[in-house]
Amino acid sequence: MKTDFLVIGSGAAGLCFALKAAAHGHVTIVTKGEMNECNTNYAQGGICSVTYAPDTFEKHIHDTLVCGAGKCEKQAVELVVRRAPELIRDLIEWGTRFDKTPDGRFELNREGGHSEHRILHHEDLTGAEIERALIESVKKNPNITVLEHHFAIDLLTQHHLGEFVTRHTRGLACFGAYVLNIDTNEIETILSKFTIVATGGCGNIYSRTSNPVVATGDGIAMCHRAKAITENMEFIQFHPTTLYNPGEKPSFLITEAMRGFGAILRLKTGEEFMDKYHPMRSLAPRDVVARAIHHELAKTGDEFVYLDVTHKDPDSVRSHFPNIYEKCKTIGIDITKDWIPVTPAAHYCCGGVKVDLNGMTSVKRLYALGETSCTGLHGGNRLASNSLIEALVYADQAARHAVAMLPKVEIQEGIPDWDFEGTTHAEEMLMILQSQREMQSLMSNYVGIVRSNLSLKRAMRRLAIIFEETEELYNKTKPNRELCELRNMIATAYLVIKQGRELKESVGCHYNVDYPKE
């Protein structure tokens, strides 16, 4: 199969790129599940954009830089913030509906780390509304082919032409991908002029995550194997408030907008505690709130704290958070009368595949977008609701850049088909699941909200064993989704641990007790 643009992933970043590029060439989207199985669909809070005074670009830039703990790339921050209103207009043209006040103005929320109300939203299901509009637009576009239930296994480079490549190979380029058709179990070779990896995050390397089960670090791992540069992988953001409901996966998110609305974090005793940790109290940046909850739970031995919104008007609570209200009702909690039990969970990867201002990786003809990428916007800690707008801005940047080069690029011929020789069908599903649980356990216990040099060393040592066992199984097994996902999660976990060991300070989401903050 040949295409101008191969987009791997069907979240906001991938679909936005597809819609922009389709006016200039043929786009093929591959996604391993249904189109709406992505992190975008689970984003509750909203999307940032400076909209009304007294907010300004300078304030949004300042808030992002402060939250990023000195690790942001200022050019990336300015690019996203200043181009945000334009991309919001595109979303609206594609059919996205944002909530408005009775006088017709956008109803703007405020979340942790923000100095102003600047978050557009659709009830508490903003991501799902954006994804709906994008999917409907994609389905109407005759220049876009969507292949659901197709799992990208590996990116194609000069390595597949028999060359020995490293990260320093001059002219290293991407020519497409090997893609597993999950329904037929066949592996197809898709050749493309440009490849766009937008597969989302890696939350499932941890036992407890707000991410859907598809978030297994596939894009980061594929780009890493293709010798693309990654950075800032140690900065895994834990969302402070997911619903405590043992056994539920993914963990149900209680949006930060609820704290922006006035909800208060409390211990089981009813005591407020965030005033001990930050002047913004319950609206402090996520890393501060997550560590504060972690610290309090370590002292008390409890498994959760509470989020209290019972002091707010009940009708207003129900209208602002209908999805959360209905979800909590299913487990016997009326959020207008009862406190909500919450606990932190792995939420967002602030690092990823390093890209420039056009979303281009260190490998030619290969772009990374959304949570797969590291643009430098987030630095050491993501400012709430910056991720969706980052995805859209960089998708637009990448589309402009790729389209400009399209006439100069040819399909690379001569790539061999996948070699099945010496492999068998997997029969050891139990082994795969057990290895996955072991990896998630060691990441949660040793590479979580609080880390140490010893915990990171132990994690790396134990992960090496799981890696060797998995590679042995992979080399003698016909690829299947579960085995490939495990392999990708191990590669992504390795990068988190490795880059965490290299950072000799506590900053942003990375807190190492051996390097305490001043």
Image: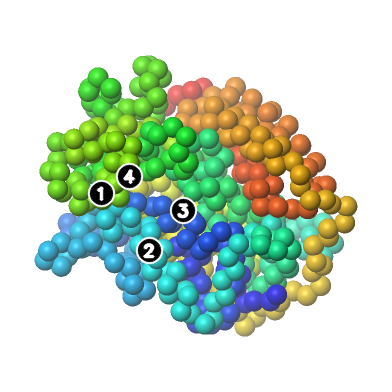
- Residue positioned 65% across, 38% down in the render: 433
Question: Viewer-nearest of labels 4 and 2?
Answer: 4
Whether residue 55 is visible, yes or no, is yes
Question: Viewer-nearest of labels 3 and 4?
Answer: 4
- Residue 130 is tagged as 2
> Height in image: 200 above or below 241?
below
Residue pointed to by mark 1: 321
Disc 2/disc 3 C-alpha distance (Å)? 12 Å
Residue pointed to by mark 3: 39
**Circles 3 and 1: CB atoms closer than 8 Å:** no
- Residue positioned 65% across, 65% down in the render: 364
Whether residue 352 is visible, yes or no, is no
Q: Earlier in the sequence, mark 4 or mark 2?
A: 2
Q: Earlier in the sequence, mark 1 or mark 2?
A: 2
Q: Nearer the viewer, residue 389 or 231?
A: 389
Q: Earlier in the sequence, mark 2 or mark 3?
A: 3
* 35 sits to left or right of 100: right
Residue pointed to by mark 4: 327
Disc 3/disc 4 C-alpha distance (Å)? 19 Å
